[in-house]
Image (cartoon, rainbow, N blue to C red):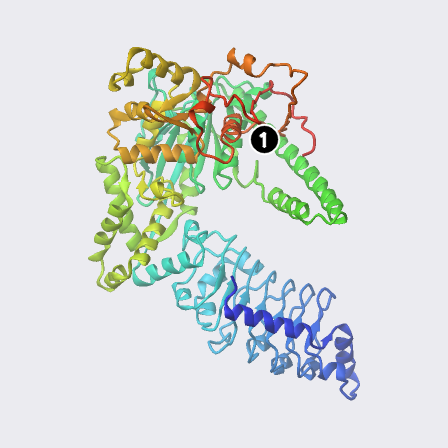
Amino acid sequence: MQSAQDYQECREEDIMAEEVIGGVEVLYFLQCLESQPAPILDMVSQCTVLELADNSISQIPSSIDRCINVKKINLTGNKLIFLPWSFYKLKNLTHLNLSLNNFRELPASVCALPHIEVLNLRGNNLRTLPPDFRVETMLKRLNLEKILGFMHHAEDRVSGRPSDVSNMTSLKSLDVSTNAITHLPYQLASLTLHDLNVTGNPMQQPPMSVCKEGKEAIFRYLTEIRESKTIASCRIQLNLLGETGSGKTSLARSLRLGIPMLTEEADRTRVVEQSLWEIEEDVSFNINDFGGHDVYRVGHCIFISQNSIVLVTFDLSTYDPCSSSDFSRHIGIWIDMVQSHNPKATIALVGTHLDKTDEWTREVVCASILEAITDERIIRQQLCERQKIDLSERIQSSQENKNEYLVSAYTEKIKSLETTSAYGESRIYPHIFMVSSKTQEGLRPLIVHLATQAKGMGVSLPQTWHEAAKTIYAKKENKIECTLCRENIKQDIENSVKGFINKIKFFWRKPRQRTDNDVNDILAFLANRGEIIWYASRPILRNTIFHRQEVIADLLKAVLNHNKSEFEFLKQMIVSEPMAERIREDFSKRGILSMQAMEALWKPFRVTAREASAMVELMQRLELCFKVNDGKYGATFHFPWLLKQSRPPIMDTKWPQLVPQDTTQLTLNVYFPYRCPDAYEERLERWGICGHDDTLHANDQKPDGQRLGDHHCCPRSTSPRPVENTAPKP
């Protein structure tokens, strides 16, 4: 929705578009005027808009000041490196576009323009803004996107000179996207900006989690650091992934304890184990050690944060360098999983059991893996290029048919392909670390690498945020509560900072809405860093903070544990033996659990009814389960990944393998160029069964977990055996 000021500015631009427009002919006349005086033509004196874009112009004549009525000049896409001093005499100039030129510094004549309101400097080579870019400027819109000087000269970046932009009191729109900016000055919060774009920068102050929430969140953060000092924070999430038995848990314990550690078979990880590793005084890691069993992979996306480090482990002693399936199983599948859910995570490969291999074997294995990664990257880049060509052809065809919807869809798809980072070189470390948890050989280079990565990912936090985070950390260490209530933690945060420093006391006495936003900012940051699990999108999840991720892990283990030979939870339920047998069969064969059964499963973990409801809501949000119906024993939920792979016999009576003559069957074939995403079939079943609804009635649900009966549409999914990557164009 446009503000009144936005409308007025747009209206002014519309009026300008109707005025006298001049082009290269005006510039040619001015050039001739310098060598041979002549009367000023009307096309020069009456020109209000100079349109000179993309003309390879390298010089503007000093007689430009003869364009006394010009209001707008567009010089984008030329070869300019300076402007004449006479440029400042253009008293009526309000809009100036100097984007995509070769300026290394902003011309002094531009700084002296008395009424400039809109200035576009995108894509130049500026190092910084000059000090004479004065406070008195009337500038309202400033575009500094992709300023190459800011990108390559970090010491001169805009963050090093806060007065450059923070003193422009009239500024309403600022774009500093796609630079190398790491810090925003707190003085920026004093401006009355309507728009602020900082995307594409490696932001540390504010952190990325704050920046992605927009201008209001950025300004709240800058206000915080204005009223309290900043503290460097370097706590990074470290995730260990790999097949069962690849040495993840032994590696995690060896890193954390600093002594040789081996894991017994009975002590293998289920879902995830978490621990804190303080590597240096100011550098620490929250370690997530994930179980490798297939059924646990559906829960990985809950715990892995966007800006984290991932170690993909594999056993050097058993890896077959001649087997493409070994690469896919032990490495490729994990890289795909991480980059599909968390494309910004950095990945390093770690070969374990170094003590069981010789030097020749290590070299062969590592060479084959690096070659496979390179080949995979090339294949995917080629496929991406083919897709973009095909989509461009479709865009052209759709434009001819005037189908704007398809044009927009195909254009968005191309943009998505261009930003895809799968197997991106910057995200996969090009060296394979080889370690032994038994002898600790090879651990030191890995530790140095992790420390270097962590220091580059550190952020600056207001001390008020630091104090609030300490409050939550203390509750995590106490292990008294399974979760935290948001209202309680808000009060704890207020209490923790009230006496921190006198000059910030008034900040926490502001109206409730401001305090709610501040608490949300802190929780969003901690969630982004992997410290807590918290979602603001749904009320029950917004009010429940999972500060102890091991609680979620335990609750998931209780449901997803692949060993279901024991049903101790039935002793917690008052049901008949036939009903107990039905619950046992539903759980083990059909992946169906009632709310009462889940509460019984979770009783050993002492979760409250509120916490159980929040956990079920979380699993539904992540599509781990869906609600089927409400019955005698409460709501019933279906976990598709717990279904048996074999086709139930009852399916043949409801849906024959061969389509009957009097039946029409619609088949949708979905081709994946690499591999089927994790839990794709299960999620497809969830979408097909539930459609746009979240619940089904009891008479819609058959014992085998499929929606069968008198319906117009019935889903069925089948998965063929893996084939070579010969997928057709999409």
Asked if 504 appears above or below 94 in the picture, the reply is above
Left or right of 371, for residue 485: left
Identify the secondary structure beneath mark 1.
helix
Most foreground residue, 203 or 639: 639
**Mark 1 nearby-residue class (10 Å; few <14, some 14–19, many ≥20):** some
Q: How many marks?
A: 1
Quadrant containing the C terminus in the rendered view = top right
Q: Position of residue 237 (x, y in %)?
A: 39, 38
Most foreground residue, 195 or 628: 628
Residue drawn at the location 51% of the way across and 71% of the way down? 5
Asked if 546 appears above or below 436 in the picture, the reply is below
Place residue 49 in its image quadrant.
bottom right
- Residue at label 1? 373
Left or right of 306, for residue 94: right
Can residue 241 be seen here? The reply is no
Residue drawn at the location 66% of the way across and 84% of the way down? 68
Most foreground residue, 285 or 610: 610
Can residue 642 be seen here? The reply is yes
Place residue 123 in its image quadrant.
bottom right
Q: Position of residue 289 (x, y in %)?
A: 38, 29
Q: Position of residue 718 (x, y in %)?
A: 58, 20
Q: Amino acid at mark 1?
A: Ile
Q: Position of residue 714 (x, y in %)?
A: 56, 24
Tell which residue pokes out farthest to the left in this image: 499
Most foreground residue, 85 or 658: 658
Asked if 654 appears above or below 489 in the picture, the reply is above
